[in-house]
Image: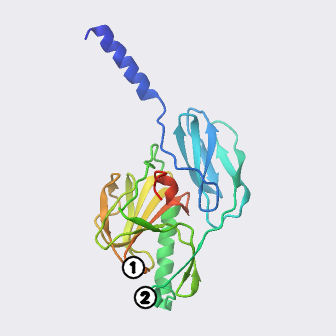
Amino acid sequence: MNAFFRQLIGIVLGFLAALPVAHALPREDAVPGGIALIRLGQAAHAPHVWFQEKRVAVLRNRQGWVALVGLPLSLEPGVHELRIAHPGRAEETRPLHVAAKRYALQRFTVPDQRKVEPLPEDELRIAREQKRIGEIKAAFRDEPAPDLAFRQPAQGRLSGNFGLRRIINGLERSPHAGIDVAVPVGTPVLAAGAGVVVDTGDYFFNGNSVYIDHGQGVVTLYCHLERSNVRPGEPVAAGQRIGLSGNTGRTSGPHLHWTVIANGTAVDPRLFLPKAVK
């Protein structure tokens, strides 16, 4: 290969390296518990976006910057506002339209009534844990290229849908904030995407759990584990084994519960999975 062709190849490779990286985006479903994708146009630098005063992930695709907005299950349908700050420009607001969705009702029984009606000493523990969970949800790590091309963290049948309104042991409880994968105890549980472990531990309702921060306010949670084999602060690769499934916490039987959090709120994990996943 002569010097001219080597120089030409170097120029082409340099040009390709300078092209904007196209990030994987979840599917859009602008309903309570879903994801809204707001196109922000082309710019040299990513704008900052807030929804309900919480910072929102902003990713680039071939058409420009896109805000990935997690919509709380409690959000009222209608028109809401995003706040957008482009570098060197005045802040602007943009309308965000949210459609209505009614989730199905689920009734089930758990053997431990204490997990449904906690004792006073349990309430103190739950309050401490909720404070920690709130801190995890509120964190925003400026990762320029978050890995959001998620894969299902355990191989098994999806047995519990996101958003189900739940009656547990005859009592109304909070909606289902993730999806359940029906697997026996000891099934390998894998990181849905690359990230950093931010917490592990035994939680009252969630049992043995692992939280992974993927950057830009996107966090995944893996619950009811038999055990975990990662530690806070540890980087993990997509598909890396982080523990084994179990039957800990508030459960009606062995399974993996998987939650995806975006800008501080749980959203439907199926939107981050290949469309063929049912």
Residue matched to label 2: 111
Crowding at mark 1 (Cα within 10 Å: few <14, some 14-19, many 20+): some
Where in the figure is residue 27, as x and y percent of width and height?
55, 50
For badge 1, the amino acid type reads: Gly
Residue for point 51% across, 67% down? 161
Q: Looking at the picture, does residue 80 appear above or below residue 203?
A: above
Where in the figure is residue 260, as x and y percent of width and height?
49, 60
Of the pair 173 and 237, the residue shown nearer to us:
173
The quarter of the displayed image where residue 159 is located: bottom left
Is any atom of residue 71 visible in this view?
yes
For badge 2, the amino acid type reads: Pro
First along the sequence among labels 1 and 2: 2
Q: Is residue 49 left or right of residue 209?
A: right
Q: Which residue is outermost to the left?
A: 1
Q: How many marks?
A: 2
Residue matched to label 1: 253
Q: What element carries label 1?
A: loop
Of the pair 120 and 88, the residue shown nearer to us:
120
Is any atom of residue 140 visible in this view?
no
Residue for point 34% across, 74% down? 246
Q: Looking at the picture, does residue 260 appear above or below residue 116?
A: above
Residue for point 48% across, 77% down? 128
Where in the figure is residue 270, as x and y percent of width and height?
50, 58
- Asked whether the residues under the numbered discs 1 and 2 touch, taking CB atoms below 8 Å apart as contact, a structural biologist would say no
Where in the figure is residue 132, as x and y percent of width and height?
47, 70
Q: Residue 146 carries which label?
A: none
Q: What element carries label 2?
A: loop
